[in-house]
Amino acid sequence: MQNNVLILDFGSQYTQLIARRVRELNIFCEIKPYNNLPEDLEKYKAVILSGSPFSVRAEDAPHPDLSQIKGKKPLLAVCYGAQYLAHFGGGAVAPSNTREYGRANLSYIKDGETFFESISEGSQVWMSHSDTIKDLPKGATVLASTHDVENAAYKLENEETYAIQFHPEVYHSTDGKQLLENFLVKIAGLEQTWTPDAFVDITVAELKKKIGQEKVILGLSGGVDSTVAAVLLHKAIGKNLHCIFVNNGLLRKNEFEEVLEQYQGMGLNVKGVDASARFLDALKGESDPEKKRKTIGRVFIEVFDDEAHLVEDAKWLAQGTIYPDVIESVSATGGPSATIKSHHNVGGLPDFMKLKVVEPLKMLFKDEVRRVGKSMAIGDERLGRHPFPGPGLAIRILGDITAEKVSILQEVDHIFIKGLRDWGLYDKVWQAGAMLLPVNSVGVMGDERTYEKCVALRAVESTDGMTADWVNLPYEFLQKTSNDIINKVPGVNRVVYDISSKPPATIEWE
C-alpha cells in the first residue's frame, strides 16, 4: 500500500486511536508490536511511536532497536516514545512531582516551526504520564511547553524526528489532528490518497491477481462486514464467489429467513444452510465463554468444509475479518497488548480444511468498512445495521446454551431492537442487544410468586468498537420495553439496563 505509516505499539490504550486519526487524514497506516518490527521497513514513509503503561526507567521497559528508523525516516514519538528517545539519547527522565494527567494548555510554541503550523498558544492538549522529561536528549530543541511541562514537545536537530509528551490522538487535544497532519503531510510529505474509492480499486485489483479464476466460498451473515466483503469479491471474481449463510441456531428472531430474502436482487450467489441443531448439540453443557466461541468456530468450519465439497474446485474461504478483530486477538507473547478475547474469524483454518483464506477487509476499521460500502452503492439500511457477534446469542446467554434459552433471548432481543426502531433510536446506537443472565430472581405476577430469569439490556455508542459509552436511553422507552418483555416473554420477570462503558467493560458480556 502506498504512503504507509508504521505505528509501533508499546501497549498504550490509545494506539488504535492514533491509527484512526491517521486514517481520517486519508493516509494508510498499520499497527505493529514494538517487539516484532516488520522485516521490510522500506515500504513505510513515516513512523509513529505510541505511548505505553511502562516507565522508561523500569528494567522491563520496551527497548526496541530503532537504528533503521531514527534519523532515516520521519519519526513522531508520542508520550512514552518521547521519553524513550530522551532517556536513551543522553537526556533525563524522572518521576513527575505531580502526576501529569488530563487537560493542559500550550503556554509556549517556538516560532516558525512547521510542526506547529496553524496551532496557537493556549491550544488544549491531553497529558497522561507519571514520568516527565527533565533534560532533553543531545541535539534537541524545545518546540512547545505547558505551564507544568517545559519539554512538552521537542525536535532533534538534523533529523525529521519530533517528540511530544501529550496525546494528539484523543479528542481532548483540540489541535491534535492538525499536528498529525503537519507531521505526516507537510513534514513527511505523504499524499492523502487513502479514500474508499481508492481502497475499492486497489483491493479489487489485488483480489483479481490473487484469486484469478479460482472459486471462493464466503460465509455471509447479513452484517455489514460480510456484506461489504461479498460485494468487493463479487466485483473481482463475479460468479466464482459462492456465498453461504449458515443458521447456527443462535441468530436473532426470523433473521435466517429475512437475510436470505434481503440478498435477493443483489446479484450474489447465496445458499442458506440450516445447521442450528448441529451447533446446539455441540454446545450442550458448555458454559465457559472461550470454549463456547471455540466450539462455534469449530462447527462453523466443519459446516463450511461440508459445503465446500459441494462446490467443485473451491480453493478459498473468504472472511469478513476487520482490523479491530486482528488487534484484539494479538497475544501477549506477540505484542504488548493482552488478548481481550478470541475472535471466531481470526486465527486461520485447521489442517484438514484445504481452503486458503482471503480477508479483504482485515485492514479496515468499522467506520471505514461502512464508507467503502457506501462508495459501492450498498444501501444505507444494510450499512447502518448494528454489529452482531459472530458467535451470535451464545455469548449473550451467560452459562450453558439450550434451545429454550435461545428462544427466550430471541423474543427479548426482538422486543428491544424493534422498540429502538419504533422510537427512532436505532440509528443513534452503535450496538444493542440483550443478555440472558444465569440467575433467577423473585417476582410477583398477579397473586403468584415467581422465580424466573433476569435479562440485561445493553446499548452503546462508538465509532469503531475499540471504545464505547453506554447510551442514555429515555426512561419512558426503557419503562415500556421492560413492561413489554416481562408481559410478553414467559420465563422473564426482571429487566436491568447495563450502564458500563468500554473500557473497563467490554461491549459483550462474554
Image (tube, rainbow, N blue to C red):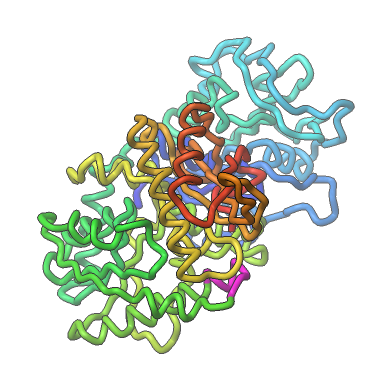
Picture residue at 60% right of the left edge, 56% below the top? 452
Q: Residue furthest front?
A: 447
In this picture, is 307 found above or below 421?
below
Left or right: 453 in relation to 386: right
Q: Position of residue 269 (x, y in %)?
A: 15, 67
- Please name the residue shown 51% across and 22% down the image: 114
The residue lying furthest to the bottom in this view is 352
Query: Where on the picture, by quarter, is residue 32?
Result: bottom right
Place of residue 76 in the rendered image (x, y in percent of width and height, measured from the top left): 58, 37
Who's the residue at 59% across and 23% down the image?
173
| 494 lies above or below 423 | below
Judge whether 371 appears above or below 244 on screen: above
Identify the magenta region: 286-293
Q: Is 68 part of what is drawn in magenta?
A: no
317 vs 41, left or right, is: left
- Work out whether 196 lies above or below 110: below
Query: Can you give x and y, in whole percent of width and height, for residue 346 in the image?
Result: 47, 67
Kindly tell me whether residue 191 is visible in this rendering: no
Name the main secondary structure of what is drawn in magenta.
helix
